[in-house]
Amino acid sequence: MKKLGCFSVILITGASLWLVSQIYTSIWPVGEAVVRLPMGDAIARFQTWGGGWGTLPFVLRVDTPHGTISKKLWADWGPASDINLYQTPENWLVGIGGGGDTVIVDVMDTSGPRSVIGDEQYRTNDENWKYLGVAVGDGFIPAESKPECIALLGAGYTKYRKKFQVEHFCVQPIHEHP
């Protein structure tokens, strides 16, 4: 039987550790911001995943007594690493991430939380939304502690909350833009 050299053992050990890390980060999030929502007994979870084998690293999960929905958000392209959360008069949860990526979830639907898409999403008036705060990595900063700002990062767009958008980065507290 042929003996393995030191380099071969190191290579096999390294490959094994990499494989285990990819499996681990594909099963559990590596970071999670948990936010109790003001709509019913709903909880939002902004999850950061390790990105193993084609998964998107950011997910918004909403848990209610009637069920759970997970929405894949954007791929990790650098600075887009947080999400502003809003409550609409319809009791929908809106998430607007870096670059303007937007997701809307009907939290109070009795058959379970569901995506609000198509023409239905245009029936809400974003001037009447309540800014809840921003979820970042494994924490949540409430609206009282962080003024609303949507960083478009030079590449994004959203039709919502235009007066709070900045072209690139939110570098200081911004209350409203003309």
Image: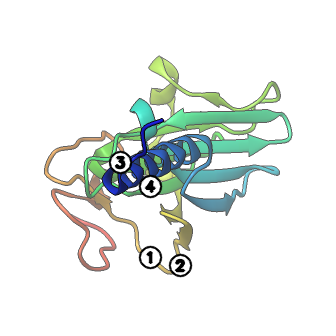
- Tell me the quarter of the image containing the C terminus: bottom left
Residue topped by disc 4: 83
Tell me the amino acid under the disc marked 1: Lys
Residue topped by disc 1: 146
Disc 4 to disc 3, C-alpha distance: 44 Å
Circle 4/circle 3 CB separation < 8 Å: no
Label 2's element?
loop
Question: Which one is in front, 80 or 29?
Answer: 29
Q: Earlier in the sequence, mark 4 or mark 1?
A: 4
Total numbered labels: 4
Q: Earlier in the sequence, mark 1 or mark 3?
A: 3
Q: In the image, is 106 to the left or to the right of 74?
A: right
Give the foreground label among 2 and 3.
Answer: 3
Disc 1 to disc 2, C-alpha distance: 6 Å
Circle 1/circle 3 CB separation < 8 Å: no
Q: Quadrant of residue 177?
A: bottom left
Label 4's element?
strand
Residue 103: image location, x then y, percent: 47, 37
Residue topped by disc 2: 144
Tell me the amino acid under the disc marked 4: Ile
Disc 4 to disc 1, C-alpha distance: 12 Å
Q: In the image, is 74 to the left or to the right of 105?
A: left
Residue 1: image location, x then y, percent: 48, 35
> Residue at point 31% right, 39% down?
159
Circle 1/circle 2 CB separation < 8 Å: no
Give the foreground label among 1 and 3.
Answer: 3
Label 1's element?
loop
